Structure formats: C-alpha cells, structure tokens
Image (cartoon, rainbow, N blue to C red):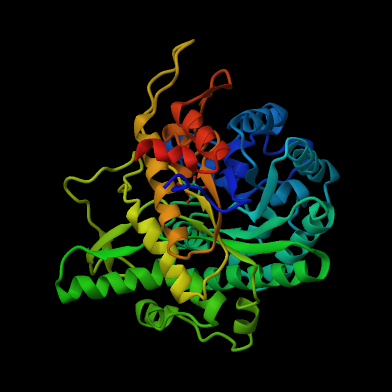
Amino acid sequence: MTNLFRFPQGFLWGCATAAYQIEGSPLADGAGPSIWHRFSHTPGMTLNGDTGDVACDHYRRMEEDVHLMAGLGLNSYRFSISWGRVLPEGVGKINEKGLDFYDRLVDRLLENSIAPMVTLYHWDLPESLDNRGGWLNRRIDDWFAEYARVCFKRLDDRVKLWVTINEPWVIVDGGYLHGTLAPGHRNLFEAPLATHNLLRAHGRAVEEYREVGSHQIGIVVNIEPKFAASDLPEDLEATGRAHAYMNRQYLDPIFHGTYPEKLREMFGEAWPDWPAKDFELLRTPIDFLGLNYYTRGVVRHDPDRIPEKASPVRRKNATYTETGWEVYPRALTDTLLWLKSNYANPVVYITENGAAFYDPPVVEGERLEDPLRQSYLRKHIQAAHAAIDAGADLRGYFVWSLLDNLEWSNGYSKRFGIIHVDYATQKRTRKGSADLYQRIAQSNGEHLRTFQ
Ligand code: BGC
C-alpha cells in the first residue's frame, strides 16, 4: 500500500503554456503579426476587446517565470514557439532575435533541470501566410516543414520532446467552422480542408524531424469522451457522430490512415475525395501522443448543430468549471485506456489538464486558496494513475496552466493558472494549487496518499 500513488520513474511533472497567451510584445524584435494579433484587434472578437499585447509579459519576464517553475519543483515545461517571431513572413527570412528568445528560454530551463517540451504550432499562424490562404492552402505543408526545420536545427541539441500541432480539432471547429477563434471563418466547406492540411503539415514536420532531429516528436489532440444524454436511439447515434467528429477525426488518420466513415455523411458534399497518397503522409509514425483532457461531453441529438447534429447537455448535480465544463475525472482514466486499446498502446503525455474557477482577490501575506482547482487537479492526477495501473503507457502530466493568461476569445476573464497574475502590476502570486502540485511533483505522486 505504501507506493499506492507512485508514478513510473522519470515521469514528467510539468506545466503548459502557449506563446500568444502569455508572452505579450507580439511585434517585438522584428516579429511578424499572427492571425491572433489581427483577430484580437478586430472589434467584437474577444471579450472586452482583450488582446495579447501585454498578456503576462512573459517575453520580458521569462527568467523570473523560469525561477517560479524551479520553485515549484517541476522537471518539465511545455511551451510553444511563435512562428512569426522566428519567420516574420512565415517563410523565408529568419529573425534571429526571435529564435534567440527561445534559445535562451531552453538554456534557462535546462540550468534548472527542467526538460522542455516544445510545441511548434499553438494557433498563432503568421498573418502573411493567412493572407495566402493559411490552412486552406495545400502548400502549407511546405511552409510548416520549413519553419519546423529551422526550429529543429536550432534547438534539437537540447530539446528532446517536440509537438507539431496543438489541438487540430479546436483550430478547425473554432477557426473555420464556427468563427469563435482566429481566423474567424464560418464555412462548412473549409473545415475538412483545414483539417486535412493540418494533418498533412503535421506529417511533413515529422518527416523533416526524422532527417534533422534525433529525439522524439508527436502531436497534441484534445479528447472529450462522449456520453449519450439518454438511451434514445437518436441520442446514441448523435453520440457516435460527436465522437467521430471531435475525437476520432484526428486520431484515426494518424494511427490507421483513414478518416471515420461517419464524417463523409456528416459533411455531405463538403467532404472532398482526398488523394490516396496523402494518407501515407498522415500516418507517418510518431513517437508519442499528447492528450489534452478537460471534460467529458454529454450529448443529445440536435438537428441544428453542424456538422455533428449533436449538442451538449448540462446535467443537474454536476460540478462545472467557469468555462462551463463538467468536472468528470473518471473519463480521463477511460480515455487513456481507450487510446491504449484503439491506437496500439501509444506512449502518452497528458499535455494539458486544468480548470478555470473563481479565484478570490489576492491579500498580501495570505495564501490564495483555490480549493476547487486543487480538488480538480488531485482527482485528475489520481485518475491518470488508475490508467497507468491498468496498463496505459503514460509518461508525464502537464497542468494547464502555469500562469493565469489570455483565454483566447474569453480574454482575461478565465483564470486557469496555478500562479495568479495581477495584470495591472504583473505580480505573480502562488495559489494553493501551486503548493499542492509542488508536493505531488516532488513526491512523484506519493503525496496523493494523503487524500485517501
Ligand atoms: C488550449 C489552451 C486553452 C485551454 C483552456 C486548450 O484548448 O490548448 O490554449 O487555454 O485549452 O481552454
């Protein structure tokens, strides 16, 4: 019983962030603007017109933030590179100053024994590439491969874990179908094209990596297990569609070389016939899968919702976070075991897990208590452990997020950090969840026994 919650040796305990959400200074030192810069500066697109112009000012406070991570006892950190800092036009001329920032970040991390996991694309496409069609242009596989190669060549001597793309489903569903995220399109016909080009670009980056890199590379998907709101056949069918659309759409091509058949039905004439040779590229072998898990979805049939004809249902007597997501840790265990049995037991990292809850104001000298976030993290880490016990090959866990940050179109209204950020002063204050996570990380999970 003593080792009840001990995690495998070498397990990574980290926090995750993304460039546009924390860095600020989006145009500094020769960086080119991204679609998120343009989108957030377009009136009406983000809550209160919030932008990433300052965010957590991490671009200028990076050393202080690495110091905070070291204080948390983390042995890993997942961050993303802003494509436009490295290649202001998306391709062509390299901006050395932008690349230098990430180079310094990697060095500071390693000096503190924190292993970097680097995401190449966390949603901030260079605007100049979007002007050429962005993810709708088939040539983006070349553009992404060029950018990826620049990053690999500069950092692979020190970075051992790479992620090509973060959450292709969210990019497409929010950015191309419902318009809630950059670039803000609403077009059923564009969605499959963007999906396919994201996956092609991912495949090309992996190919590049096999030529110039010598460590490990994968992709990050967000999985939300779907449960039927009732036993009615129409709700059960809606659940299957929602699952194919949100979850299987991005895993089946990579692991099996096909899209789920249901997608063709759902998209109808908007679903193209893809060149057969593309699927070889899509299924280029990866070294690990990154799983972002936040919640499950309880769904019912809804003919008005495109393309899946299924809508989420809010349940009575359940706990919801500030983003309206049900707290449901058990489905994290189920998801890890589903990945194991359906996709040949891949090496998995939980690359994001966390919650936005109301946080009280900071009072000087007092600990900022966030009991709901603490309970959320604890229960999810326990659920992850249950999956390891049942044979899942889980190698690490990253909290979303290190700092409160720009929650995309929700602006600064949602706080996911285990460290509070006062946006007026940029003062960082640890929350109770930071203390809890430190204890869990430093004991390699054993601290969880306290809660049995
Ligand atoms: C994204 C993050 C985001 C988080 C919470 C994920 O979809 O990767 O950028 O802030 O979830 O919404």
Using the image, determine if residue 204 lies above or below residue 174: below
Q: Position of residue 345 (x, y in %)?
A: 52, 71
| Left-right relation of 181 to 242 | right
Q: Compared with residue 165, is residue 328 higher up or lower down, i.e. above or below?
A: above
Q: Position of residue 182 (x, y in %)?
A: 52, 52
Residue lying farthest bottom?
Answer: 276
Image vertical order of residue 280 relative to residue 303, above or below: below
Residue at the far top: name it: 365
Q: How many marks?
A: 0
Residue 387: percent from left, percent from top: 43, 59
Which percent across, then down, holds residue 240?
31, 74
Look at 36% across and 69% down and name the residue there: 243
Q: Is residue 173 above or below residue 199?
A: above
Image-quadrant location for residue 30? top right
Residue 45 in view (yes/no):
no
Residue found at x 26% / y 71%: 238
Asked where in the image residue 133 lies, by quadrant, the reply is: bottom right
Q: Residue at x 68, y 26 (%)?
A: 64
Q: Nearer the viewer, residue 147 or 287?
A: 287
Front in this rendered view, residue 131 or 399: 399
Residue 336 in view: yes
Residue that appears at 80% across and 55% down: 156
Q: Quick one: quadrant of the C terminus?
A: top left
Residue 363: quarter of image:
top left
